[in-house]
Image (tube, grey):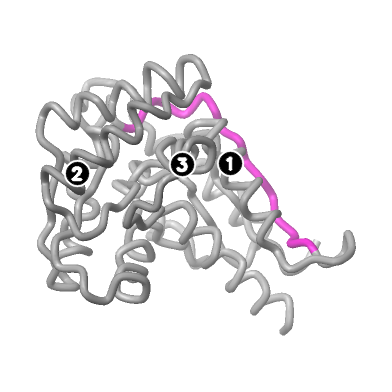
Amino acid sequence: MKNFFSIIGGMGTEATESYIHVLNKRTPAHSDQDYLNYILVNHATIPDRTDYILDNSKPNPLVPLMDDIKQQSSLKPNFFVIPCNTAHYFYSKLQSITDIPILHMPKEAVKEIGLVYPKAKKVGLIATRGTIYDGIYDNEISNFNYELVKPTKHIEDETMDLIYKYIKEKNIVNAELYHHILDEMINEMKCDVVILGCTELSLAQERASDHNYPLVDAQSVLVDRTIDMALHNKQK
């Protein structure tokens, strides 16, 4: 197969499925042959990224992630996509072992703010506790001179419940809780825009949102960048 990309997924599987669904839905296709060539590695047994970031004695996700990158690199994809925000904690190490570019989801999400919300100054972030603590969005937001607004401990706990207790454990989106979290970030924390910095939150947005919140969905942005890059390579 020529002109394809590789997706390192399974973190979690439902979130990866959401990425694939949106990717295929947005691809400008009128026949089977118009869709994009890709390989999906749904590596569901990769250890939890947040667990490791908060406690380095836990199993290290970097080891299987590196194995996946090395394995897929031998097949020579045009680029890699990792639809998991927290996994970008390991981005530099993963990019260092391959010459094939890896799309950087947090960086692309922050770039999108200026395009969609040019007047935004206060940028909120909701994500896993690992993403909040490891700061993978902090430098990107600072580089664009935005004021980063992180969730309070209360909002952080609610977000972890939404991600882990509902979506990861039960494959259920608690729409009321999701909307409540966004209301808190926008109305109480006074954010001009909120980044959905976890693919489970992107799944919640896909299934539950019927409100016009000022959001930048990192996974949605990643889908658009994936299509742009794949179509560019397809035309070569």
Direction from residue 175 to residue 233 in the image, left or right:
right
Q: Residues within 10 Å of mark 3 (few under 14, many from 20)?
A: some
Q: Earlier in the sequence, mark 1 or mark 3?
A: 1
User: Which residues are drawn in magenta?
Assistant: 35-49
> Which residue is pictured at 17% across the width and 54% down the height?
191
Q: Earlier in the sequence, mark 2 or mark 3?
A: 2
> Measured from the top left, where is residue 22 in percent x and y?
62, 51
Label 1: state its secondary structure. Answer: helix
User: Are the residues at dot 1 and dot 2 in contact (C-beta closer than 8 Å)?
Assistant: no
The residue that mark 1 highlights is 18
Mark number for residue 209?
3
Q: Amino acid at mark 2?
A: Met
Q: Amino acid at mark 3?
A: Ser
> Measured from the top left, where is residue 164 in percent x and y?
37, 21
CA–CA distance in space, label 2 to label 3:
15 Å
Q: Residue furthest bottom?
A: 236
Q: Residues within 10 Å of mark 2 (few under 14, many from 20)?
A: many
- The answer to whether residue 26 is magenta is no
Residue 65 appears in the picture as rendered: no
- Between circles 1 and 2, the one closer to the viewer is 2
- The answer to whether residue 45 is magenta is yes
CA–CA distance in space, label 1 to label 3:
14 Å
> Which residue is pictured at 23% across the width and 54% down the height?
137
CA–CA distance in space, label 1 to label 2:
24 Å
The residue that mark 2 highlights is 185
Residue 148 appears in the picture as rendered: yes
> Measured from the top left, where is residue 120 in percent x and y?
20, 69
Q: Amino acid at mark 1?
A: Ser
Task: Identify which residue, 65 or 31, lies in the foreground.
Answer: 31
Label 2: state its secondary structure. Answer: helix
User: Are the residues at dot 2 and dot 3 in contact (C-beta closer than 8 Å)?
Assistant: no
- Between circles 1 and 3, the one closer to the viewer is 3
